[in-house]
Amino acid sequence: MYGNDFPTDAASSGGELLEQVAAAEAALREAAERTLDSADNAETDYFERIIAADQKIEPRDAMPEAYRRTLIRQIAQHAHSEIIGMQPEGNWITRAPSLKRKAILLAKVQDEAGHGLYLYAAAETLGVSRDELVEKLLSGKQKYSSIFNYPTLTWADVGAIGWLVDGAAIVNQVPLCRSSYGPYARAMIRICKEESFHQRQGFEILYTLARGTPAQREMAQDAVNRWWYPSLAMFGPPDSASVHTAQSMAWKIKRFTNDELRQRFVDMCVEQAKVLGLTLPDPNLRWNPERGSYDFTPPDYDELMRVISGHGPCNQQRMARRRAAHIEGEWVRQAASAYAAKQQQRQRQQEAVAA
Ligand code: FAQ
């Protein structure tokens, strides 16, 4: 776990993630200080040299069009996921069991909106506008994570989302703090620091329920049973079917494959489940001393593909809600534009008076 308010001996693998974020932050600064020697300035292979030197590509640098497009696809999908991801938990804000739980959940859901904004801003540095990206989400041309198409049936689901979904998100995202595109890597550092709090609040909800009444314990176990496989599927198709991984790793956008990260997540969760006193719903979970990892049953990848293609339990509901929220927010966008225009006009008048 990311702290010391739970017995930590069996849960050590979680705390290391924040240390990895701190190391990535230091590496970002070092990369910015390293310079290529003068012969390295040749335009033609500048991009390759930056990637090979583990420095960061910045918005004004020349970059292959396919690199730019891949980043827009991944960052936009990630931003959309944060925004749609507010819905399953938002569903429980009015029904949180205490004022304290309500305040914590409100802060968490608000953080997701912030993550969406950091990511849309990072994508904009690649030459697309946020309006364009939002339009692509609303028209179904861009995706968001499969995980947010599952329903939150009980309060324990809020705990399971924090522990498992944010847990999977952080395992996937810590390596993105070392992504080769500077604005993305910098956004991910801040996001990961906040995600660690999210994961911890989910763990704490389940920890409390697991020590409550038999009914509360059962509710916690049921939530873990339902969220386990969808969380494993978040890491994407298996490596053998992943179309983008090889190129994204060559460009150092991704640092590990989908299967490597999925395995890392399983190994982390098995230890943390012991601390919770809950079981993971997989009869085949077994330590494999040769591999130094747990063997596990993979998620149903056909189901993942069905959910990605719009046929999960809540796809229609999530998109309908997002479209409605976009229409309801039109007056805010209009008011902000009118205010910005007035400010500009005022500034121009002041400059004219001063001249
Ligand atoms: N869901 O070739 P690959 C969060 C698509 S944030 C939907 O392996 P890639 C925080 C993929 O886009 C969660 N689509 O692709 C939070 C591609 O489709 P395309 C989001 C998926 O990019 C917590 C196709 O399948 N995190 O949870 C999924 O190399 C709680 C082929 O796949 C990120 O976005 C999926 N699960 O690897 C918020 C992290 N998996 O575009 C609220 C950044 C795959 O060709 C509450 N993204 N696809 O049509 C990544 O790391 C990568 O994009 C992967 C996929 C690993 C998701």
Image (cartoon, rainbow, N blue to C red):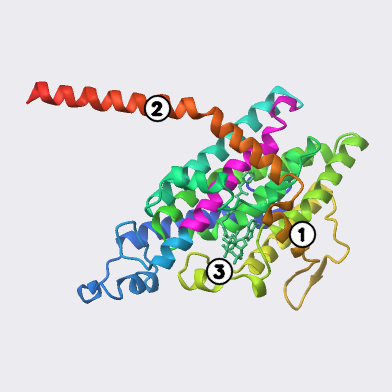
- Badge 1: residue crowd in 10 Å (few <14, some 14–19, many ≥20): some
Q: Which residue is mark 2?
A: 336
Task: Tell me the SS state at disc 1.
Answer: helix
Instruction: Provide the secondary structure element on which disc 2 rests.
Output: helix
Whether residue 191 is in magenta: the answer is no
Q: CA distance from mark 3 to mark 2?
A: 38 Å
Q: Tag 2: Cα neighbours inside 10 Å, few (<14), some, or many (≥20)?
A: few
Give the amino acid at mark 1: Glu
Q: Mark 3 belongs to which amino acid? A: His
Q: Point out residue 172 in the picture as x, y percentages from the top left corner.
A: 60, 58
- Segment colored magenta: 72-96
Looking at the image, is mark 1 or mark 3 earlier in the sequence?
3
Give the quarter of the image for residue 90. Answer: top right
In this figure, which residue is indicated by the disc labeled 1?
303
Picture residue at 69% right of the left edge, 52% below the top: 310
Indicate the position of residue 117 as horizontal and vertical percent values: 48, 41
Residue 58 occupies quadrant:
bottom left
Tags 1 and 3 touching, CB below 8 Å: no
The tag earlier along the polypeptide, 3 or 2, is 3
Q: Quadrant of the C terminus?
A: top left
- Distance Cα–Cα, label 2 vs label 1: 42 Å
For image coordinates 81% across by 36% down, the residue present is 154
Q: Nearer the viewer, residue 88 or 24?
A: 88
